[in-house]
Structures are given as structure tokens and as C-alpha cells.
Image (spheres, helix red, strand yellow):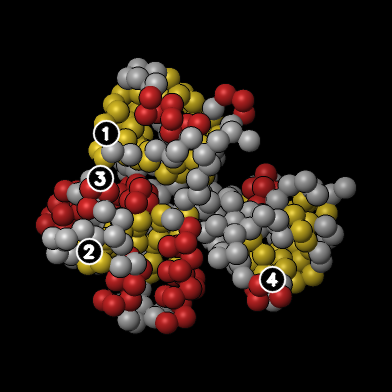
Amino acid sequence: MTFKILVEPGGLAFGAEPDETLLEALLRQGLSMPYGCKSGACGACRGQVRRGEIDPGPYQPFALSASDLEAGKALFCCARAQSDLTLEHPGIVPEATIQPRIIPARVEKLERRAQDVIVLLLRLPAGEAFPFHAGQFIDFLLPGGLRRSYSLANAPEEEGVLEFHIRRVPGGVFTGHVFENLKVRDILRLEGPYGSFHLHEESRKPAILLASGTGLAPVKAMVEHARAAGVLRPFHLYWGCRREEDFYLWELPEQWAQTIPDFHYTPVLSEPEPGWRGRAGFVHAAVMEDHPDLADWQVYACGAPAMVAAARQDFTARCRLPETEFFADAFTLQSVAP
């Protein structure tokens, strides 16, 4: 049975099957909306259900609170229709021009940058274009129908190669293969690009770039793209890690701060050792200390779901950041095959 879904404002409509999420249904039928993790963790696809019944699905409580549920809100990447619906979300629009596709790529470089982080560089087939927006992600296609999602870490202007920052997950199906068995010249299959996490170039507002761990990957892509495209606006990068050795590309943000006009960088450690002279604590708390009023800013956050959720909540509630100016992608971990 196909349910009829009406979208306000704009009057767009699509159909949804009971066994697919609202996000899957609208993407399948040529529509698009802001989304990131596809697992109910980042909150980017949160919208209002005005009429009808849904199954809210396996969402994360920090991305959708009990009060949100009572108010009729839902995460469209998790929710499934149980009747005809009327939804409210201003970000649902006709699909963008870049369509996901499957493509092979050859391993060109494996660089161990930290004990648990490898920078993986893939080479595309000769003459093969793979357009994407800086900040988007792809799915690696694994045996048995498994997929693992990783953000692209290079700008789309860098043709012919794709860069990824792979953190090892204990028992991880894909990361175990990358760290133990993957070799230069091996072939990987990937599908994408996916996601709506990207730099909004039409805005000239100053921007906070907020990353934890390998959440630096899409931020790196955004910074490199902005530099190549001549986007002139203030940026302040806050990169949070647990220990100093976790800053696996330590020299790169320092270089940006020295060479890019109006670019600022603040590293933050949550578990600093004696001798650390930088900022300590939660990385989003450092942002609030430096920028107590974010009313005229944009924020791009990527990394641990708890960090992304806390930043969204605190920036909008305590720093006057408009909710429409918070853009996020939250990383979720899958350690073993289902």
C-alpha cells in the first residue's frame, strides 16, 4: 500500500511505502532535503508531521527529544508512514543535478597519520568525472550487501582522486580490512555522492567550522573548495580531539591560519596531558566562550553524534544561532556485520 505524502510549504507530493523511510521515499522520487547521517543521529532531516500517523523509527534520543515527539516532530531518515501524511519542511525541494552512481576506484596511497587513522587516497578511472559538493559522503560497497559511509576529504576541484580519513573501529568490517589487508592498487567500489552537508556559498556570514576527530574530513573539503572558488568570508575552525596525538593532520589547519585571510584555528583537547598549552574541555564549549552571540553566524558541525547534538542545542538556545544556520553531519559507527 502506497501512502500519499503532501509537503508544506510548496505543495510538493510523493508516495511512500510502509517499509521505507520518508527520506528514502522522497529521494527515490526526485526530491531532496537536508540530511546527513541517515541513522537518526545528526538531526539534519528533522521536520514536522502536521497530519497522519508515523512510526518514528530507531532514532537517537539526543537528536529527537520526547518533547519533539509530543510536538509532532520526526526525523525523516528514520520515520515511516503509517497513513497518508502532511509534512512541513521548507528544505524539501526538487532533486539537485548531481545524481549518485556506482564507480570503481584504485587505491593510490595509504598513509598512517595516527595509531588509529589512515588517510586513504583513491584514483578514479582515467577520464572519469565524479562531481560532488564539498562536504558530501559516499558509501563503500562491501561483500554481502554491506555499506560503510565516509565523507570525502578533498575538494571537488581536485580531479581524478578521492580522499578519505578512516578511523579504525574495534571489530570493524571495513576498517579492519583497510588497516590489515588493503594494499596499493587494490580496487574498491563506491556509490555516491550523498548528503546535503556542504558549504552554502550564497551566504557571506562568518562561519564556525566545528569538527571532532575525523569529522575534520568534510571540513577539509569545504576549506579547500572555498579557497579554490575564491569564497571570501571569515572562518573559525575548532577541532576537538581526546589527546594531542589524535590531531592526525596537525600541521594543516595551522597552515590554513597562516595563509588564508581571515581564517582562525583553535585546537581543543577533552583529555589533555600535562604540558598541553591549548584549550581544554568540550570543543563546542570553546566556541561558546569565544562567540557567545552567534546570531549573525553560520555553523558547520561534523563528528561524534553527541557533540553535534550538544552544539545544536546549546548554540541555538544560548548563543542565539538561528536553527536554519546550523548544518551538520554526525558520524555513527558500525563495528560488526549484522
Estimate the x, y position of residue 192 in percent, counting from the top left.
51, 37
- Report, in whole angstroms, how far the alpha carbon at label 3 lies from the one at label 4: 39 Å
For the residue labelled by badge 3, is the local secondary structure a helix, a strand or a loop? loop
The mark that comes first in sequence, 3 or 2, is 3
For the residue labelled by badge 4, is the local secondary structure a helix, a strand or a loop? helix
Give the crowd class for mark 4: few <14, some 14-19, many >=20 residues within 10 Å.
Answer: some
Q: How many marks?
A: 4
The label shown at residue 90 is none
The mark that comes first in sequence, 3 or 4, is 4
Mark 1 touches mark 3? (CB < 8 Å)? no
> In the rendered structure, which amino acid carries the disc numbered 3?
Tyr
> In the rendered structure, which amino acid carries the disc numbered 4?
Leu
The label shown at residue 248 is 3
Relative to 231, residue 144 above or below: above
> In the rendered structure, which amino acid carries the disc numbered 1?
Arg
Position of 229 compared to 315: left or right?
left
Q: Which residue is mark 4?
A: 69
Mark 3 touches mark 4? (CB < 8 Å)? no
Relative to 122, residue 198 above or below: below
Estimate the x, y position of residue 128 in percent, counting from the top left.
41, 26
